[in-house]
Image (spheres, grey):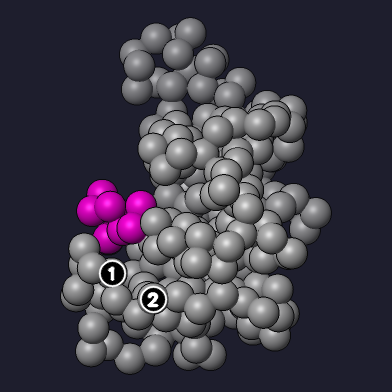
Amino acid sequence: MPMLFSNVWQSDPDRMVMMAQPDDFDPMAQLHAAAFARGWSAHDFAAMANDPAITMLVARRVGTKPGTLDAFNVVRQAADEAEILSIVVDPAQRGGGLGLRLMRDAIARFQTDRLSQVFLEVAEDNAPAVALYKRLGFEVVGRREGYYPPLSQPASDEEPQLAPAGVEHSRAKGTSGAASGTASGLADNLAAQTERRTALVMRLGLV
């Protein structure tokens, strides 16, 4: 069965963490589409809600109704292991540690459920996300060369979208290498946009 999550962060009593409701699926899809080349639709989230192995967690301010949320985390559990499938924070709420607190809440629930380990995958060039996961205690246990599509190439249906949101989207729409003021900078940027990217497999042991 999916794990139960605490209702309120002790460090942020103005926000609640709760299971996603049907009214949340559209805004979740909008946030996901803004973060990834191939976003998940509201229909995708509805299908996941019917999967007993998947838990969809949303963060919203106290007093707000379903359909108003600041972030979400999608988790899959199998036996004594868990996998972070996607964690997304509203761009307007980034920089305040919301993603970190959302992850800490999930990890606390994994420990309560006596899970042994948690896995996730993240693009190697997503430096802020990699740093956040290392701060939480995750370690790199594997690499998948060419796992993610180039930044300028939309992901196909077969491409898993497991990396955290935000940085991927902002870099894909970021400035070109011309901002460096050099021809070599432009060439490096164009090369980075056309090369398939490496995924890091990261693990957090809980026991």
Distance Cα–Cα, label 2 vs label 1: 7 Å
Q: Residues within 10 Å of mark 1 (few under 14, many from 20)?
A: some
Instruction: Specify the quadrant of the image occupied by residue 127.
Output: top left
Query: x%, y% of residue 159?
Result: 74, 50
Residue found at x 57% / y 44%: 205
Note whether 39 is above or below 193 in the view shown.
below
Instruction: Specify the quadrant of the image occupied by residue 47.
Output: bottom right
Note whether 98 is above or below 7 in the view shown.
above
Q: Point out which mark residue 44 bears.
A: none
Q: Secondary structure at mark 1?
A: strand
Horizontally, is 191 left or right of 101 in the view? right
Q: Looking at numbered disc 1 in the image, what kind of residue is underneath it?
A: Trp
Q: The N terminus lies in which quarter of the figure?
A: bottom right
Horizontally, is 97 left or right of 58 in the view? left
Query: x%, y% of residue 13?
Result: 19, 73
Q: Is any part of residue 72 visible from this angle?
A: yes
Q: Is any part of residue 163 visible from this angle?
A: no
Query: x%, y% of residue 67?
Result: 40, 86
Instruction: Specify the quadrant of the image occupied by residue 185.
Output: top left
Residue found at x 27% / y 88%: 64
Note whether 135 is above or below 90 in the view shown.
above
User: Start and end of the magenta stretch?
Assistant: 91-101
| Residue 63 or residue 188, whichever sits in front | 63
Q: Point out which mark residue 6 bears.
A: 2
Note whether 119 is above or below 106 in the view shown.
above
Query: x%, y% of residue 148?
Result: 68, 39
The answer to whether the residues at label 2 and label 1 have Cβ atoms under 8 Å apart is yes
Q: Which residue is mark 1?
A: 9
* Secondary structure, magenta segment, majority class: helix
